[in-house]
């Protein structure tokens, strides 16, 4: 976290007016023409000052969203900001949606709904895309701990119920391979 950067912004009179003039629940306010990393610094300061609010930063395209997210990760405590990426294919295109992007979208929403994330960075297009959220998201999570013992066959069964595909060599997201007592997954 970089408190000097945030404190410098807080000392600006325009920041105080913006903070005091924020809209109520269900409303929005656009802020434009901020150069460089200033949008991320502003979002970080507001999120730090008003911890009971959820913030959505909408970027114009994926590279800008990734840059803003990276800045926020630097400026805010760990886990405060998440990136909600847009799909790589448009809904009317024949190309299948990328599994990794879908996973990132679900993880970001789950983190937001669980209260771990308070700043969501996304794009205009991603905001418009509908995402199916599983009713029982908790059932789709598997936590493994150091020292925990689980039979590789049982782990393989669980991974398959979670949608992983068994392969001889793991090369893509959603694949796993079991060789002897070792399970490799991505």
Image: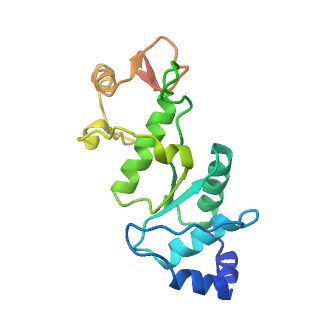
Say whether residue 103 is left or right of residue 154: right
Q: Nearer the viewer, residue 10 or 58?
A: 58
Image quadrant where residue 137 sits: top left
| Vertical relation: 38 (above or below) 114 | below
Residue 8 visible from this viewpoint: yes
The picture places residue 15, in percent across and down from the top left corner, at 62, 82
Q: Residue at x 45, y 13 (%)?
A: 167
Residue 11 in view (yes/no): no
62 on left or right of 50: right
Which residue: 53% across, 30% down? Answer: 90
Residue 131, given in percent of the width and then of the height, sits at: 39, 39
Q: Position of residue 2 (x, y in %)?
A: 66, 72
- In the image shown, does 62 or 82 lie closer to the viewer? 62
Front-most of residues 83 and 26:
26
- Quadrant location, the N terminus: bottom right
Q: Please identify the residue farthest to the top as the structure is shown.
A: 168
Total marks shown come to 0
Q: Residue at the spot x=59%, y=86% of the render?
A: 16
Residue 125 appears in which quarter of the rendering? Answer: top right
- Relative horizontal placement of residue 59, taking residue 119 as reference (left or right): right
Residue 47, how many percent across, how many down?
A: 51, 71
Q: How is the image coloured?
A: rainbow
Decide: is 34 above or below 128: below
Q: Residue at x 34, y 41 (%)?
A: 143
């Amino acid at each position: 976290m970089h408190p000097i950067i945030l404190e410098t912004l807080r000392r600006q009179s325009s920041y105080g007016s913006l903070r005091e003039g924020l809209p109520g629940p269900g409303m929005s306010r656009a802020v434009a023409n901020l150069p460089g990393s200033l949008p991320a610094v502003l979002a970080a300061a507001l999120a730090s000052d008003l911890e009971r609010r959820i913030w959505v930063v909408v970027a114009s395209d994926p590279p800008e969203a990734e840059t803003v997210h990276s800045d926020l990760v630097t400026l805010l405590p760990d886990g405060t900001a998440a990136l909600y990426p847009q799909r790589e294919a448009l809904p009317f295109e024949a190309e299948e949606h990328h599994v990794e992007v879908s996973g990132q979208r679900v993880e970001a929403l789950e983190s937001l709904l669980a209260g771990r994330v308070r700043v969501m960075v996304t794009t205009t297009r991603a905001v418009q895309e509908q995402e199916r959220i599983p009713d029982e998201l908790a059932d789709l999570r598997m936590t493994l701990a150091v020292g925990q013992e689980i039979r590789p066959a049982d782990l393989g069964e669980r991974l398959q119920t979670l949608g992983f595909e068994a392969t001889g060599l793991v090369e893509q997201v959603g694949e796993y391979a079991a060789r002897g007592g070792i399970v490799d997954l991505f």
